Amino acid sequence: MSNQDLVLMAIRNLFKRKLRTILTVSGVMIGAAAIVIMISLGIAINENHEEMVSQWGDIRLITVFPPNQWGWDDAPNRDLKLDRDAVEQFRRLDGVSVATGVIDMNVTARAGRFVHSWLPLRGIEPEAMEALGLVPSDGRLLEDSDRMQAVFGIDSPFEFRDPNSRHWTWLSRFNGDEPLVDVSSARMQFSFEWGFGQAGFTSSMRPFNLTYVGMLEEKDWNFDRFVYMHIDEVRQLRIAQMNFENQQQGNSNPTNRRNQAVDYSMAYVQGVDINAVRSINDAIREMGFDTSSMIDTLDFLSESSRDLERLLGAIGGVSLFIAAIGIANTMIMSTYERTREIGVMKVIGAKIKDIRKLFLIEAMLIGFIGGIFGSGLSFLVSYILNNSQMTLGTTGWGMEGSSNTSSIPLWLYGAALIFSAVIGLIAGFLPARRATRLSALSAIRTE
């Protein structure tokens, strides 16, 4: 008999016992839906974690720090430098989309009568800004020819204060406040001296003028509070700051501090995707540098939820296992009821393998049909969970928008169908084996 004939015969046999078939398929449907829903809860938890972490910062971004940033003499790798050669090594790693050094320093800035006592300047390579996802909301990004020109992070103007005011109010754009200074039009100067801009202060150095060229859109807390300048310009400013401090302190051996001023404060390395970030992060740490990445937080959260995923999957698996027992029971009862039919098939010349195939196909069809209806049921349950008030998948932590409680990717539907069919095939193995081992003559005599 051809496989097509066997499939048609199997379908006819199932329809002969409609109620039993419906009940058995229902068991598989519930089991398949249970395991899909349980797995979807675990997938939703991981997706919510990823969404939450991505809102904290760019999940593809790695921040690299010098191995001995605190200057301890007994620190490991204390002679390793975070300099241009190191950043060039980072660029050559597989999966790196951008790598740039960063030099940070703090100055005291003045705009009219308002003062920023701790203005964070960040030197960065102009060509890296766009690659890091920095987008101007006004003006433009830095260009290679810029000198003493700056792009402001969206939060940087809010920390200007009136030094003559007795009561300083904490301003924030999150509260709907407006900054005291319009940095796009104000004449801005900065100095290395802490008292710069205060009433009655006499400066011992000539302040630097700073020209506004752009304002950035919101990105995340790693970027929004800084004022960006060309990295070569900030390097020179940092050296000048070190020289000024050495003069003030009477330091006669400024060489070590001068070298620190030339090296990068840190570096940004961005991967092409999440998987690349993990390998890049490990490779940079093996070089001896310290790193910080949102992927570490995501991995920690995923590890903490892994036991819950296993538990949910086990609960769904038990349901499908019970459904498999139902299939086996149905098929065994079928062999008892169809003993005479099996004997007739053997007498008229049906091959043993065809009889085995027939019972296996019937069992597999029960599993497959149950998987189809189970997938539909799981879609419905998932829809209800995601659109009801039971926001079980919401992780909170200040996330914007709502998070799904259940998430079912297409591959999970396909896996459910295949798994249900395989479960049916396995459950039908013993009944099919019993059918093939029946004696033809004894089976014919059976009423």
Image (spheres, rainbow, N blue to C red):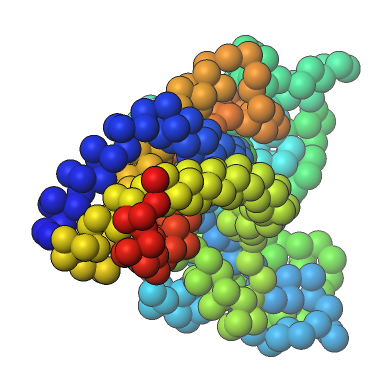
Residue placed at 19% from the left, 52% from the top? 6
In the image, 73 versus 400, the foreground residue is 400
Query: Residue 254: x percent and y percent?
Result: 73, 77
Q: Position of residue 101 (x, y in %)?
A: 50, 65
Residue 5 in view (yes/no) = yes
Question: Which sits in the foreground, 6 or 194?
Answer: 6
The picture places residue 75, in percent across and down from the top left corner, at 81, 82
The residue shown at (29%, 40%) is: 13
138 displayed left or right of 174: left
- Quadrant of the snapshot with the C terminus: top left
In which quadrant of the rendered view does residue 199 lie? top right
Quick one: 336 or 347, which is closer to the camera?
Answer: 347
Q: Is residue 141 left or right of residue 380?
A: left
Give the side of residue 74 with respect to residue 263, left or right: right
Q: Is residue 406 above or below residue 93?
A: above
Judge whether residue 238 can be spotted in this image. no
Name the spot of residue 401 as percent of width and height, x first. 54, 22
Q: How many marks?
A: 0
Q: Is residue 364 above or below residue 141?
A: below
> What residue sits 55% from the left and 69% below the top?
281
Query: Relative to the observer, which residue lies in front, 132 or 27?
Result: 27
Above or below residue 129? Residue 87 is below
The extreme front residue here reads 445
Q: Quadrant of the N terminus?
A: bottom left
**Residue at the image position 83 percent from the left and 78 percent from the top:** 72
Tell me where residue 46 sits by quadrant: top right
